[in-house]
Every structure is written in structure tokens, then in C-alpha cells.
Image: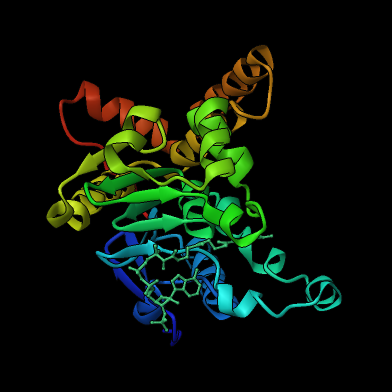
Amino acid sequence: MTEYRNILVKTEGGVVTVTLNRPNALNALNSELMDELSDAVDGYEADTSLRCMIITGSEKAFAAGADIKEMAGKSFSEAYREDFVTRNWERVSRARKPVIAAVAGFALGGGCELAMMCDFIIAADNAKFGQPEINLGIGPGAGGTQRLTRAVGKAKAMEMCLTGRMIDAAEAERAGLVARVVPLAQLGQEAKVSAERIASQALPALLMVKECVNAASETTLSQGIRFERRLFHALFATVEQKEGMAAFIEKRKPVFDRE
Ligand code: DAK
């Protein structure tokens, strides 16, 4: 098992949980942490026994953004040559298998952007979301202006990005940024229940559903429907479809092997 310095990785059944672990910096996302997270996602994708990943933080912070201390002194030349942040920030959004963000406390800047790269967010009732980059003389750089706008609409995204105002969990749920809000003490358990439910499903169907839902924000309605129909038809070629439907008819639970 790989040793990491900034994240904790725990596997149980078909679920792998990654806990961001820089408590003294409110889980600020530095290059080393993002390299480790990318590596953990690579491992998850390669392991056919795993079907769902949870990314979480501490009770106080999911992540308070990219590491400002690491970014502050960078010159343009350095940032450009090193492909600073761009290099290791997109891996989660490219995961083919499901990823849940379980967010407590601050999810700010890059932390909010990382949560939005996941497939859905379960928020603790103390969660706070924001894109406060404007206070630093910059703007969001890891998809904040794009994913937030798609999630909550132009008015709220524009207000959050221009003023840096944080929204609490209840407002995030009303705006459609999070799937649901749970009491802080139950966040881990609720995320696990969702992840285990996902992990018990057929992998080809999980991949298809994820691809189709993501296509909804990239295509026209008619293209999206056609894409969904093609993948829907294709699933009839899988053993999992035969097993799922046979199990229903035989009044038993389906068994989807994890090869
Ligand atoms: N970076 C580095 N250190 C941070 C940090 C951050 N983002 N946030 C907090 N810390 C550190 C604090 O410096 C402090 O360290 P010490 O002073 O104790 O050494 C420790 O964490 C505790 O923080 P506070 O003392 O400030 O704690 P409070 O409870 O008083 O306040 C706070 C919590 C979250 C309101 C506050 O810490 C805060 O405002 N933090 C900064 C939030 C922020 O501005 N975030 C946006 C950062 S910019 C990209 C990818 C990503 C990005 C851009 C491009 N590409 C792929 C192109 C992302 C940019 C950003 O996220």
C-alpha cells in the first residue's frame, strides 16, 4: 500500500475513502497533496474490486482552498514552466468511476472546486461553500466559474465569485449545489451508506450513468438523449443486465461480481 503524507486512504469492501489530512492548514491543497490524490484516484480506477470513492476532510474543513503560501511567490515563468496546479488538478474530474464528496466545514476556492469535480456532494450541516479568490486579487481557476454556474445558476455564482460570500449548507442545498445535508455527526456514515449502495451495483451501468449525466452539461438535449439511448442499448450486451433482470423475476437480490 502506498504511503502518503497528506491524505489517508482506507478501503472497505468496494469503497475507498480518501481523507484530506493537512489539519494545520485546514487541508489547503498543495502540489504534494494533489499529486497524492491523483495517485489514489489512479489506484481506485485500476482496481476492479472498487466501485466508489469518497473524498472527505475534517470536521472543520473539507479544504480551505489551494495553498496560498505555496502560490504566493510564484512568478508567471515558474508557474507556466511547471504547469503549476493545472498538472495535477483535473484527475478527480476525469475519474470514470463514481466519486462522492463528503463535505464538513470550509470548502473554499479550490476546495469548493474539488468538491464540485466529484459526482455529488453530501454536506454536513456545518459546511460552508465559497469562491473567495476575489479577496486575493485573483479569480477561480479550477472550474469555479463554470461548475458553480452550472450547479447554482448565473445569479448566485456571479454573486459568490464577485463578492467572495460564503453560503451555508442549507443555502447550498436550496441552490442545488449539494445532493443533501446531514447532521455533522452522521456525515461519515451517510456517505458510506451511499457509497456502499453504489458499490453493490453493476460497474458497466455505473459508468454509463455517470457518463450520461455528465454529457447533459456538454451537449444539446437531442444529442444527449441519443447518447443515452446508445449506451442504454449497449447495456443489453452485458451479463450484469441479464443477472439484474433475472434476479428481479426470480425475486432475489442480484449478484454483480467484482472481477
Ligand atoms: N492556504 C494556505 N494556508 C491556509 C489556507 C489556504 N488556502 N487556509 C487556511 N490556511 C492556514 C492559515 O494560514 C492558518 O495557518 P497558521 O497561520 O496557523 O500557520 C491555518 O490554516 C488556520 O487558518 P485560520 O487561522 O485562518 O483559521 P480561521 O478559522 O480563522 O479561518 C478561513 C478559516 C477558512 C476563513 C481562513 O483560513 C481563510 O480565509 N482561508 C483562505 C481561504 C481562501 O482564500 N481560499 C481560496 C484560496 S485560492 C487551479 C487550481 C486551484 C486554484 C486555482 C487554480 N488550477 C487548476 C489552475 C485555487 C485557488 C484557491 O483556492
Q: In front here: 74 or 214? A: 74
Q: Nearer the viewer, residue 248 or 173?
A: 173
- The percent position of residue 252, horizontal first and vertical second, equals 16, 32
The spot of residue 227 in percent (x, y) is 64, 23
**Horizontal and vertical percent position of residue 86:** 71, 63
Front residue (pair 243, 59): 59
Side of 136 relative to 175 (left or right): right
119 and 95: which is toward the camera: 119
Where residue 105 appears, as percent x and y from the top left, is 30, 58
Look at 33% across and 34% down and name the residue there: 171
Residue at horizontal 54 percent and vertical 26 percent from the top: 155
Label total for image? 0
**246 left or right of 130?**
left
Tell me: 28 left or right of 53: right
Q: Split into 4 quadrants, where in the image is the N terminus? A: bottom left
Looking at the rendering, in which quadrant would you find the C terminus?
bottom left
